[in-house]
């Protein structure tokens, strides 16, 4: 069983401003788990899709901030 201090959290965003992919990597170097959201498409005039994407970004930033407060190991 892995120790919590060996756990690593890494979040990422890949975009060209119209297509967005969100990913996260958890686990340890010996037992990694990577998940990818799939494509999210957004035209700059589509307010609902832009709000959804900005909510994803805000969630990622909040998780990173919470991790810092809990002294968890975070990779940037």
Image (cartoon, rainbow, N blue to C red):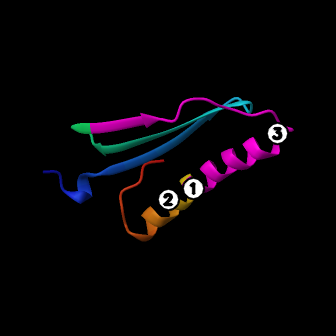
Q: Which residue is found at the position 28% from the left and 52% from the top?
A: 7
On the image, numbered disc 3 is attached to which residue? Answer: 46
**Could you tell me how far apart the alpha carbons at marks 1 and 2 are, in whole angstroms?**
6 Å
Give the percent coordinates (x, y) of residue 61. 57, 56
Picture quadrant where residue 4 is located:
bottom left
Label 1 residue SS: helix
Label 3 residue SS: loop
Q: Nearer the viewer, mark 2 or mark 3?
A: 3
Give the percent coordinates (x, y) of residue 46. 82, 39
Q: Earlier in the sequence, mark 3 or mark 1?
A: 3
Q: Are marks 1 and 2 in contact (CB under 8 Å)?
A: yes
Query: On the rendered structure, is 53 left or right of 72?
Result: right
Q: Which residue is found at the position 43% from the left and 62% from the top?
A: 67
Picture quadrant where residue 3 is located:
bottom left
Picture quadrant where residue 29 is located:
top left
Labelled disc at residue 59: 1
* Residue found farthest to the bottom: 69
Labelled disc at residue 63: 2
Q: Which stretch is magenta?
A: 32-59
Query: On the rendered structure, is 45 left or right of 61?
Result: right
Q: Which residue is found at the position 74% from the left and 30% from the top?
A: 18
Tell which of 69 and 36 is nearer to you: 36
């Amino acid at each position: 069983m892995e120790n919590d201090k060996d756990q690593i959290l890494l979040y990422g965003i890949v975009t060209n401003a119209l297509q967005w992919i969100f990913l996260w990597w958890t686990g340890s170097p010996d037992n990694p788990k990577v998940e990818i959201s799939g494509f999210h498409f957004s035209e700059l005039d589509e307010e609902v899709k832009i709000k959804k994407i900005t909510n994803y970004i805000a969630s990622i930033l909040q998780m990173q901030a919470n991790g810092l407060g809990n002294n968890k190991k975070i990779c940037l």
